[in-house]
Amino acid sequence: MKREFGKKGLWGRKSLRAWGFAVLVSAALMLPGTGISVSAAGKAAVVQGQQKEVVPVTLAAAVLQESIVYELPEENSAVIGTALSGQALNICGQTADGWYETVFGNGIGYIRSDGAAEIAVDDGMAAALAQQAQFVKAPAGQPQVTEGQPQDVAGQPSYPAAGNLIFAGDSRTGQMGNAVGGSQAWPGTAFVACFGGGAEWLSGQKAKQDIDSFVIPGSVIILNYGVNDLARHNDYIPLINRYAADWKKKGATVYFASVGPVGENEYGKRNWAVEYFNGQLNGQLDKSIGRIDMYGYLTASGYTTLPDGLHYTPDTYAKMFQFLCQSVGR
């Protein structure tokens, strides 16, 4: 089922074949020809002096209600954060006693498996999730270099400064990129996205590095974060202001594209909250940062969501892309 909203003022319900969360996980993982291998062997997490086996899995899951994320698969371990209702997670392991291992921010955490529901994804999305988990789990200082990935003379991964136009955001940004054919179809355009990404991910060094790898003088950067953590506007504002000041010194122009509307969903996300988030960022971001009213555009022109009510159909993503490009004169 898909859900249509907008100028008709009516719900439209039509059959829709399963369309997975195809997302470009990060700039460092967007190169063609990248191979992925997922080990079948489990690893052990040490809990209270005892080893607990964590079996590798690759799946996506949506948080059913606000859940604590722990450092280890044990409720007595340190708390590293909170996964919000409706937030999409990259699940990369599970234990026999009901814990999921998940990518969280720039690291790994654990949540109770009964607090999240699996989301069906296609093979391409599963491969992207596996890549992201592999990268996050890599020891510091050991770059993930896979067959077919370009190298510089020092043996480090070498990423092309692909773009004059850089889209940075969460799974909506990644899905938009896939809907229009990605960087292959649009040379000079980069899509830097993190599945389930929000303020936690964006604030990490890795996220900034991913975007920086594409910034050249004259670049245009369009940021579109927030749907996963609408209550964290006070975290986004100083973060985006700081990043934008740095990118401006490098000769880039920065825009904030407002969070697009949501449809009916079971995660407690409502358009009044989207509007409040957008209003806070529009009012408090530095005046040097351009504003693009994605919310107003989709509300006026109409949009269609997937059954989850949070993500859009390929047609809606395609017109989003066209609108954003036109908004910055591309």
Image (cartoon, rainbow, N blue to C red):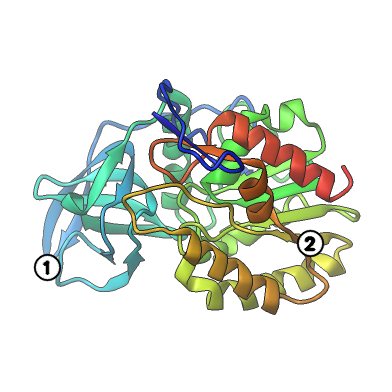
- In this rendering, position of residue 184 left or right of residue 311: right
| Amino acid type at mark 2 | Val
Q: Residue at x 66, y 55 (%)?
A: 296
Element type at mark 1: loop
Q: Is residue 175 visible?
A: yes
Q: Residue at x 84, y 67 (%)?
A: 248
Is residue 132 or residue 164 the one in the foreground?
Answer: 164
Total labels drawn:
2
Question: Which amino acid is tagged 1?
Answer: Gln
User: Mark 2 = which residue?
Assistant: 254
Q: Residue 133: give x, y in percent of width and height.
A: 42, 45
Q: Looking at the image, is 124 positioned above or below residue 87?
A: above
Q: Which of label 2 and label 1 is nearer to you?
A: 2
Expressed as whole percent of the image width and height from the top left, the position of residue 230 reads: 48, 65
Q: CA distance from mark 2 to mark 1?
A: 47 Å
Most distant residue in the front direction: 9
Residue 258: x and y in percent read 65, 59
Task: Report crowding for label 1: few under 14, some 14 to 19, many 20 or more residues within 10 A (C-alpha).
Answer: few
Q: Up-down: is 50 above or below 249? A: above
Q: Secondary structure at mark 2?
A: strand
Residue at 21 percent across and 54 percent down: it is 115
Question: Which residue does the numbered mark 1 point to in the structure image?
Answer: 48
Image coords of residue 280 (percent x, y): 61, 75
Name the foreground residue: 212 vs 134. Answer: 212
